[in-house]
Image (spheres, helix red, strand yellow):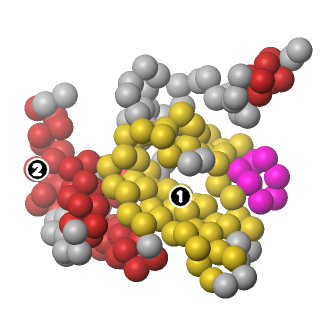
């Protein structure tokens, strides 16, 4: 039995599933399944075939994972998760297509709310801020406000600079 076969027998389809990275399987089947990364700094990319690839993220990396699926009658699922990749041994939540999982900073479902998050990300980036470096508490705020039917606060450069200073002081 090869090591790849052994890892599959143990429930790990990816031969590199035991490293310190968080792996996200992305699929694109036109008008059926579209999983993509909206932002994030991947450490590596592994192409499985013309429709699937694996993006891998280092521990502590923040990324946005968008999932959309449809059938003959239209959209059946759409969601966005903003996750922080975890280090081996750290607690995490499971998310479909993410191995082993991640710390969920934002989880929103249904296309109108997903669009609001995507617009919010655009505003952050238009302000000259890398969405990967936004304060994790802000992503939690955005998810909680949208899920409650409220408008989230805008993330400004002043808030961002305060977050960066806090991160320097409190490790």
Tell me if 167 is positioned left or right of 44 in this view: left
Q: Position of residue 76 (x, y in %)?
A: 58, 73
* Image quadrant assignment for residue 159: bottom left
Q: Earlier in the sequence, mark 1 or mark 2?
A: 1
The disc placed on residue 156 is none
Q: For the residue labelled by badge 2, is the local secondary structure a helix, a strand or a loop?
A: helix
Q: Residue furthest top?
A: 1
Query: Residue 161 or 82: which is nearer the viewer?
Result: 82
Residue labelled with disc 1: 37
Q: Residue at x 35, y 70 (%)?
A: 117
- Front residue (pair 14, 50): 14
What element does badge 1 sit on? strand
Residue 146 in the figure: left or right of residue 118:
left
The residue at the far bottom in this view is 73
* Residue at 69 percent of width and 29 percent of height: 12
Rendered view: 154 above or below 63: below
Spatial distance from mark 1 to mark 2, Cα to Cα?
27 Å
Query: Which residue in the protein does label 2 denote?
Result: 162
The magenta span reads 47-53
């Amino acid at each position: 039995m090869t090591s790849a076969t052994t890892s599959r027998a143990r429930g790990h389809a990816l031969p590199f599933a035991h490293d310190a990275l968080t792996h996200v399987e992305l699929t694109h089947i036109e008008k059926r399944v579209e999983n993509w990364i909206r932002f994030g700094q991947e450490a590596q990319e592994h192409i499985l075939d013309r429709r699937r690839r694996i993006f891998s993220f280092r521990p502590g990396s923040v990324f946005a994972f968008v999932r959309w699926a449809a059938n003959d009658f239209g959209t059946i699922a759409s969601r966005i998760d903003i996750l922080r990749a975890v280090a081996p041994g750290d607690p995490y939540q499971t998310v479909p297509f993410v191995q082993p999982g991640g710390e969920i900073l934002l989880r929103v479902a249904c296309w109108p709310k997903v669009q609001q998050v995507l617009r919010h990300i655009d505003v952050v980036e238009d302000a000259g801020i890398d969405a990967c470096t936004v304060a994790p508490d802000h992503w939690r705020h955005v998810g909680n406000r949208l899920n409650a039917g409220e408008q989230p606060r805008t993330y400004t450069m002043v808030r961002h600079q305060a977050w960066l200073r806090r991160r320097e002081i409190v490790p």
